[in-house]
Image: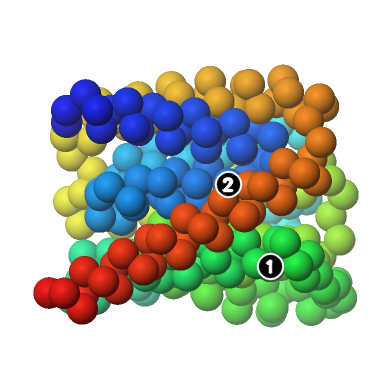
């Protein structure tokens, strides 16, 4: 892998790690969106997966809520694992060239829902069965794009967790999802020795970005930062989807 691409990977994961350190999520979303501009989503996901797992594991154990989170979210996590496994051929199958379109559309939807601040609440008695359905949907989207933010994050925001518990819950959920994705990638032959160097660069830059984001979190205006981040994701999503559609029509 030549040097300019390694520089792009380093810059992408510095930014993705910074956003995760500031907001508590967004590393795979940002990294997949940026890398998909220059490489196919399966190749991008093979680079993203190890930093995503490592940073999510770290986030999982920062907080005292782990046992309660696992008990409360197990249907969501089981559903996500099932959704990823049932759709395991989507990244490299005959419909793989539609992956960038789905990824681009997902980034736009993610940005619009965040900017519009769509929110809803869910009764505690409905969490389990709704969580299972949300997990299946999230798993199918994740198996296709490598991104797990929709519809899982709105669901987690709807069940009424406190801020620090929500941040830890995001770490727990994303750990389960990314580990399952890693098995998919291994079975598909996408995790090879060729991904070792870019993966190592991505991992190191992710943690550097996270530490910077955490250090600056209290000094930044969170709402302004969130708005600019979401607007950037929307523009990036439009570009990725439009480019993929153009390539399909031109083929």
Q: Are marks 2 and 1 in contact (CB under 8 Å)?
A: no
Could you say where residue 173 lies in the image, as x and y percent from the top left? Answer: 60, 53
According to the image, label 2 marks what residue? 26
| Image x and y of residue 240, in percent | 38, 61
Instruction: Name the quadrant of the N terminus.
Output: top left
**Local crowd at mark 1 within 10 Å, few (<14), some, or many (≥20)?**
some
Relative to 173, say whether 89 is above or below. below
The x and y percentages for residue 131 are: 67, 72
For the residue pair 207 and 183, the one nearer the viewer reads as 207
Q: Secondary structure at mark 2?
A: loop
Q: Secondary structure at mark 1?
A: helix
Q: Is residue 176 left or right of residue 163?
A: left
| Alpha carbons under labels 2 and 1: distance apart | 14 Å
Q: Name the side, left or right, on which 29 lies relative to 215.
A: left
Sequence-first disc among 2 and 1 = 2
- Residue at screen point 38% across, 67% down: 241
> Where residue 43 is drawn, which disc sits there?
none
Vertical placement of residue 73 versus 194, above or below: below
Counting from the top left corner in percent of width and height, residue 250 is at: 16, 74
Could you tell me if residue 76 is visible in this image?
Answer: no
* Disc 1: which residue: 113
* Closer to us: 148 or 59: 148
Quadrant placement of the C terminus: bottom left
- Residue for point 67% across, 60% down: 153
| Res. 65 image quadrant | top right
Count of numbered tags: 2
């Amino acid at each position: 892998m030549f040097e300019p691409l390694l520089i792009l990977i380093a810059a992408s994961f510095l930014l993705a790690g910074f956003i995760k350190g500031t907001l508590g999520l967004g590393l795979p979303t940002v990294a997949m969106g940026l890398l998909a501009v220059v490489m196919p989503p399966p190749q991008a996901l093979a680079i993203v997966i190890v930093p995503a797992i490592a940073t999510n594991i770290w986030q999982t154990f920062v907080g005292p809520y782990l046992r309660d989170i696992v008990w409360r979210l197990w249907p969501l996590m089981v559903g996500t694992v099932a959704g990823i496994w049932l759709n395991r051929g989507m990244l490299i199958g005959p419909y793989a060239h539609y992956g960038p379109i789905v990824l681009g559309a997902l980034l736009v939807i993610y940005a619009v829902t965040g900017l519009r601040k769509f929110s809803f609440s869910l009764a505690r008695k409905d969490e389990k069965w709704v969580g299972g359905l949300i997990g299946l949907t999230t798993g199918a989207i994740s198996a296709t794009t490598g991104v797990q933010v929709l519809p899982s994050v709105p669901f987690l925001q709807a069940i009424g967790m406190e801020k620090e518990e929500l941040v830890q819950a995001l770490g727990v959920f994303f750990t389960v999802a990314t580990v399952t994705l890693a098995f998919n990638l291994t079975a598909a032959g996408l995790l090879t020795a060729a991904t070792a160097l870019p993966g190592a660069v991505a991992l190191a830059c992710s943690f550097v970005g996270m530490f910077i984001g955490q250090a600056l979190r209290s000094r930044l205006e969170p709402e302004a930062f969130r708005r600019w981040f979401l607007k950037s994701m929307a523009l990036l999503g439009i570009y990725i989807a439009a480019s993929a559609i153009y390539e399909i029509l031109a083929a």
